[in-house]
Image (spheres, rainbow, N blue to C red):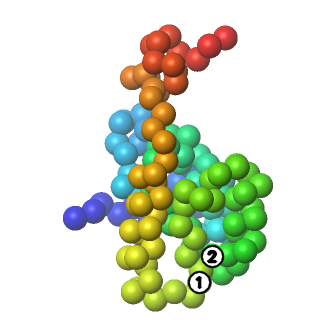
């Protein structure tokens, strides 16, 4: 069983991801479209999500997969290899395998060790260096 939250606005989704991070509640999967209703983009949402949850499985659906991949590559080197791009139109039978591929890609992301506050990759517990 999964709890599903549908957010029609990218800004709301970004805010919710921050809240979840603060509550130490990690989502199991992020599914986003390339273009979002409030002018945000899927790649921006993915980038925000991965700051909070580096190994979060991601499926991005899009009617323009080549443009989406190019946009993702321009935002962050290596990001596109860690998400699953699902071209539209797709059928329900395409969706579950895409989720499985997204989980496999996310599992292959190297783990970054962070302290309890999540802000010091060195694990010193002193926060970010000056």
Residue drawn at point x = 75 percent, y = 71 percent: 67
Specify whether 80 is left or right of 112.
right
Residue drawn at point x = 40 percent, y = 76 percent: 97
Residue ID for mark 1? 88
Specify whether 43 is left or right of 118.
right
Residue drawn at point x = 49 percent, y = 48 percent: 109
User: Residue 63, relative to residue 77: is it above or below?
Assistant: below
The N terminus - image quarter = bottom left
Specify whether 69 is left or right of 84.
right
The C terminus - image quarter = top right
Q: Nearer the viewer, residue 124 or 1?
A: 124
Q: Nearer the viewer, residue 78 or 69?
A: 78
The numbered mark at residue 78 is none
Measured in 3D between alpha carbons, the distance from the residue under mark 2 to the one under mark 1, in whole angstroms, is 5 Å
Q: Nearer the viewer, residue 88 or 109?
A: 109
Work out whether residue 37 can be spotted: no
Q: Where residue 91 sits in the image (x, y, percent)?
A: 46, 89
Q: Where residue 37 sits in the image (x, y, percent)?
A: 64, 67
Residue 73: quadrant of the picture: bottom right
Residue ID for mark 2? 62
Mark toward the start of the polypeptide (2 vs 1): 2
Report the residue that reaches farthest toward the left. 1
Q: How many marks?
A: 2
Category of crowding for the residue at label 2, using alpha-carbon neighbours closer than 10 angstroms: few (below 14), some (14–19), many (at least 20): many
Q: Where residue 54 sits in the image (x, y, percent)?
A: 49, 43
Work out whether residue 124 can be spotted: yes
Q: Where residue 83 sits in the image (x, y, percent)?
A: 55, 61
Helix, strand or loop at disc 1? Answer: loop
Helix, strand or loop at disc 2? Answer: strand
Category of crowding for the residue at label 1, using alpha-carbon neighbours closer than 10 angstroms: few (below 14), some (14–19), many (at least 20): few
Residue drawn at point x = 70 percent, y = 49 percent: 76
Discs 2, 1 touching: Cβ within 8 Å: yes
């Amino acid at each position: 069983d999964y709890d599903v939250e549908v957010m029609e606005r990218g800004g709301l989704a970004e805010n919710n991801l921050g809240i979840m991070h603060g509550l130490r509640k990690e989502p199991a999967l992020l599914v986003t479209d390339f273009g979002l209703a409030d002018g945000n983009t899927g790649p921006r949402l993915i980038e925000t999500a991965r700051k909070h949850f580096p190994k979060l499985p991601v499926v991005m659906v899009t009617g323009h997969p080549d443009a989406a991949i190019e946009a993702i590559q321009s935002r962050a080197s290596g990001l596109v290899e860690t998400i699953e791009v699902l071209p539209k139109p797709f059928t329900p039978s395409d969706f579950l395998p895409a989720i499985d591929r997204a989980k496999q890609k996310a599992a292959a992301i190297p783990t970054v060790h962070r302290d309890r506050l999540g802000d010091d990759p060195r694990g010193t517990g002193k926060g970010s260096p000056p």
